[in-house]
């Protein structure tokens, strides 16, 4: 695990949409040296030329030799490639062998449990820090509620959570999205009430802060929020999500017809999701087209008094929000501001207070938090 000094951070997939912004934000906020990695030399050289003191190295995620050479130059590697369900733990395995820290914005529960978990013992033995799910969803979607609960309450009785995300889908994101549908990640039309899962029978019209406003949302209890509730003994969770109507229709069709069993079905379904997301962009207000909003209300007790908190994090575009979150995570790992050696979900891996200090400074972010007294 790293200490505080100038480090070399390698970004695999460094010339992609997320990778470029991770590089930009790290250069803007840290003294660290950056190496961009990828299989396309022309794209990589062109991307590196857009920054001062950034270089490119060829690195193919399916070629352990090139990955080995790339990781040999780094103190920390950030994996911005995908789809994670296809590529698995290839980059993480090489980082482990080279004895360097690792950050990945992807890493759903199945990937964490079934792929990366086999490395947990060796990561600890080498004193390394591996952080998965260091993006927006998953990532901020778990860290923000965990932070509010831990810093604002002695006990939380109820969490009401809203997540909105709109915009186009990359091929990698769409493929991973299909895999989450296959794996039944999250439980639709379910809430947690007094420690028991119960059915919710209908969508709800929810008044959210601007620019989202009043919007229809569906109940979906995710594994990440269940995990956060378990950490903090929260027994009642109402979780609601909103995506574009065309994307939602595609999702429901894919699930209903189980069009995710074979690689061909996954490919066709991923293309359908991409088309659905693109169609939504043509029908929604410009202010909503790429935005992300997390809006939470919590009821509980602090110092013997009942209180309610309302927290909103909004960004007009999910891509830079993801990239800045990944970059801030890499910065904390490089500076040693982490929970310690080991394999971590994002919310458990970083120093949450230090991350929130960085998070509030992200470009374009609107973050509000209010507390009211007796309920």
Image (cartoon, helix red, strand yellow):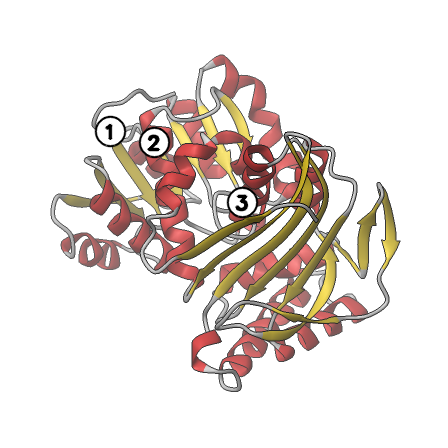
Alpha carbon separation for disc pair 2 and 1 = 8 Å
Q: Mark 2 — residue?
A: 76
What residue sits 16% from the left and 57% below the top?
Answer: 50
Taking the view exactly as shown, the residue that stands out farthest to the top is 125
Within 10 Å of disc 1 (Cα), the crowding (few <14, some 14-19, many 20+) is some
Q: Give the mark nearest the N terminus, 1 or 3.
A: 1
Distance from disc 1 to disc 3, alpha carbons, whole Å, reads: 28 Å
Disc 2 secondary structure class: strand
Q: Secondary structure at mark 1?
A: loop
- Left or right side of 217 for 343: left
Q: Secondary structure at mark 3?
A: helix
Tell me the tag on residue 322: none
* Residue 238 screen position, x and y as percent: 74, 54
The answer to whether residue 340 is above or below residue 359 is above
Residue underneath mark 3: 144
Q: Residue at x 69, y 61 (%)?
A: 240
The residue under the point 25% across, 51% down is: 24
Q: Would you identify the image quadrant in which residue 202 lies?
A: bottom right
The disc at residue 7 is 1
Q: How far, Cα to Cα, is label 2 from label 3?
A: 25 Å
What residue do we see at 78% from left, 46% from top?
236
* Of callouts 2 and 1, the N-terminal one: 1
């Amino acid at each position: 695990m790293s200490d505080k000094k100038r480090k070399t951070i390698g970004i695999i997939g460094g010339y992609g949409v997320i990778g470029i912004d991770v590089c930009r934000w790290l250069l803007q906020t840290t003294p660290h040296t950056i190496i961009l990695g990828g299989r396309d030399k022309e794209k990589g050289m062109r991307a590196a030329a857009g920054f001062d003191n950034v270089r490119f190295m060829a690195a193919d995620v399916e070629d352990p030799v090139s990955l080995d050479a790339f990781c040999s130059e780094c103190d920390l590697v950030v994996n911005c490639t995908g789809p994670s369900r296809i590529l698995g733990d290839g980059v993480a395995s090489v980082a482990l062998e080279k004895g360097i820290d690792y950050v990945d914005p992807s890493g759903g529960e199945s990937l964490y449990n079934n792929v990366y978990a086999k490395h947990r013992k060796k990561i600890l033995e080498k004193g390394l820090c591996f952080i998965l799910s260091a993006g927006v969803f998953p990532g901020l979607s778990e860290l923000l509620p965990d932070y509010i609960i831990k810093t604002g309450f002695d006990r939380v009785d109820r969490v009401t959570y809203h997540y909105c995300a709109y915009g186009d889908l990359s091929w990698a994101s769409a493929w991973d999205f299909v895999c989450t549908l296959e794996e039944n990640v999250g439980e639709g039309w379910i809430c947690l009430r007094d420690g028991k899962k119960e059915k919710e029978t209908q969508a709800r019209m929810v008044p959210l802060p601007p620019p989202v406003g009043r919007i229809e949302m569906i109940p979906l209890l995710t594994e990440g929020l269940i995990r956060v509730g378990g950490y903090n003994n929260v027994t009642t969770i109402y979780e609601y999500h909103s995506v574009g109507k065309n994307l939602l229709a595609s999702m429901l069709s894919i699930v209903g017809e189980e069009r995710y069993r074979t690689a061909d079905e996954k490919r066709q379904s991923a293309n359908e999701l991409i088309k659905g997301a693109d169609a939504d962009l043509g029908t929604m207000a410009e202010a909503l087209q790429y935005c992300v909003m997390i809006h939470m209300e919590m009821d509980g007790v602090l110092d013997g008094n009942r209180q309610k908190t309302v927290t909103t994090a909004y960004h007009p575009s999910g891509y830079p929000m993801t990239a800045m979150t990944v970059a801030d995570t890499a910065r904390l790992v490089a500076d040693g501001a982490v929970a310690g050696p080991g394999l971590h979900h994002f919310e458990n891996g970083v120093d949450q207070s230090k991350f929130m200090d960085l998070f509030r400074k992200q470009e374009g972010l609107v973050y509000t938090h209010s507390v009211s007294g007796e309920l």
